[in-house]
Image (spheres, rainbow, N blue to C red):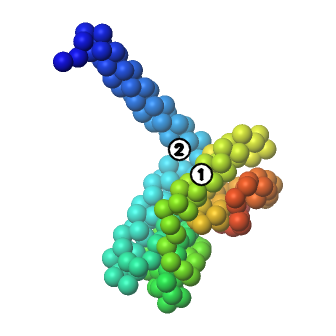
Amino acid sequence: MLSKNKRIIIAVLISVSTIQGCALLVVGAGVGAASAAHDRRTLGVQLDDKTAASRISVALSEVEALKSANIIVQVFNGTALLVGQAPNNELIQLAQQTAGSVKNIKKLHNQIRLGRPISTGDAANDAWLASKVKTQLLADKRVDGLNIEIEVENGEVFLMGLVNQQEASIAVDIARNIQGVKQVIKAFEYQ
């Protein structure tokens, strides 16, 4: 049986962690709302993009042959980006055809690479690189990092967003100079 002091300490720790969890949830929701409100796309376009990305993901998952591929979908302002790996060129083309058949896609960037899916360690490194790129974009006053979407796959950084030429150049330069980034690919739409 736990002593009274130990029970009090445990209760305090649980309370603090619950409060912190609520605070993180509130802060996270606030950041998400601020990001959505700050986005250069209308709320309708943002919703259309989320819907299109979901539709592409579902369409890809329904193709039996593509189950051996690792494909990530990102949609921004009607432009779809496919990244990942597939074991042969036929599957890469099949993924492109499948994604291209989804409504409301104006442009499609197929950046699926020939090869086996990346390891869990490489995926974790990609998440780390994405956070470093996003942090640097948000810290730089010359570019609005909230308007740039980042996808990292196997050390390659893919940048999407509605930007001007100067912002695009700055964002590419920032991403290119982060240790571990192998290549930067632009999928921007220019305003």
Q: Is residue 68 above or below residue 119?
A: below
State the residue position of label 1: 128
In front here: 6 or 56?
6
Determine the residue positioned at 43% across, 26% down: 20
- Can residue 18 be seen here? The reply is yes
Residue 150 in the image: above or below residue 86:
above
- Give the image quarter of residue 139: top right
Q: Residue furthest top?
A: 4
Left or right of residue 111: residue 59: left
Question: Where's the N terminus, which quadrant?
Answer: top left
Relative to the observer, which residue lies in front, 175 or 41? Answer: 175
- Which image quadrant: the C terminus? bottom right
| Crowd tier of the residue under label 1, counting other residues whose Cα lies within 10 Å: few below 14, some 14–19, many 20 or above | some
SS assignment at label 1? helix
- Residue 169: give its label: none
Q: Are marks 2 and 1 in contact (CB under 8 Å)?
A: no
Q: Amino acid at mark 2?
A: Ala
Residue 13, percent from left and from top: 36, 20
Q: Position of residue 64 (x, y in %)?
A: 33, 82
Q: Which residue occupies the extreme bottom position in the image? A: 90
Q: How many residues crowd mark 2 within 10 Å: few (<14), some (14–19), many (20+)?
A: some
Q: On residue 36, which mark appears? A: 2
Q: Residue at x 60, y 61 (%)?
A: 152
Task: Indicate left or right for 156 with 166 as reference.
Answer: left
Residue at 38% from the left image edge and 77% from the top image edge: 67
Work out whether residue 90 or residue 9 is closer to the camera in this orientation and state it: 9
Residue at disc 2, secondary structure: helix
Q: CA distance from mark 2 to mark 1?
A: 23 Å
